[in-house]
Amino acid sequence: MQAKAISRFGRHSYRKVGQILKIIRGKRVSKAFDLLMFVKKGSVSFIEKTLKSAVANCGMLKNPESLFVREAFSTMGPPIKRMRPGAMGRGNLYKRKTCHLTIVVADRKGN
C-alpha cells in the first residue's frame, strides 16, 4: 500500500528542497524523521509537514516503522514577482522562488 502527499506553493527554492530530499529518499520513515531533526536548513519544517501528511494518508500514523519513503521530489512552482528600488527612481523586478513538493510512502521499498 502506498500513499502520496503534495504540498504546493512552498516559499523555498526547489533545488534547495531537493538537496534535503536526497537524504531521506529510500529510507524508513522513522529514520527520515531522525535525519531531518539534524539538518539545519529552513525548509526542513516544510518537508516534515508533508512527510507527516503522507504517513497519515497511509492510515498508519501509529506505526511508521514499517513505511519507506518511496519517492520524494520537488518541482519548480510559479515565481512571486516583487519590486526593489532601483537607480534614478526606477523599480527593479526580482522573483521569489516557490516549489511543489511530492512525497510518496509505501510499505515496501520501491525500485
Image (cartoon, rainbow, N blue to C red):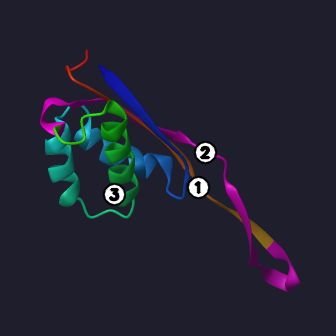
Q: Residue at x 33, y 57 (%)?
A: 44
Amino acid type, residue under disc 1 in the picture: Lys
User: Tag 3: residue type?
Assistant: Val
x, y (%) of residue 94? 69, 64
Few, some or many residues within 10 Å of mark 3 (<14, 14–19, 20+): some
Answer with left or right where residue 96 lies relative to residue 11: right
Seen in the picture, residue 27 relative to 11 is either above or below; the reply is above
Q: Which residue is mark 1?
A: 97
Is residue 89 highlighted in magenta? yes
| Residue name at image x 20 percent, y 49 percent | 33
Magenta highlight on residue 38: no
Residue that label 3 marks: 44
User: Where does the C terminus fall, quadrant-wise?
Assistant: top left
Question: Cβ–Cβ below 8 Å for labels 1 and 2?
Answer: yes
Q: Which mark is residue 77?
A: 2
Q: Residues within 10 Å of mark 1 (few under 14, many from 20)?
A: some
Q: CA distance from mark 1 to mark 2?
A: 7 Å
The CA distance from mark 3 to mark 2 is 18 Å
Question: Which residues fall within the magenta stretch?
Answer: 64-91
Q: Are marks 3 and 2 in contact (CB under 8 Å)?
A: no
Residue 67 sits in quarter: top left
Quadrant location of the N terminus in the rendered image: top left
* Residue 43 image offset from top left, x and y in percent: 39, 58
Query: Which one is in front in this view, the residue at disc 1 or the one at disc 3?
Result: 3
SS state under label 2: loop
Q: Secondary structure at mark 3?
A: helix
Which secondary structure lies at badge 1? loop
- Residue type marked 2: Gly
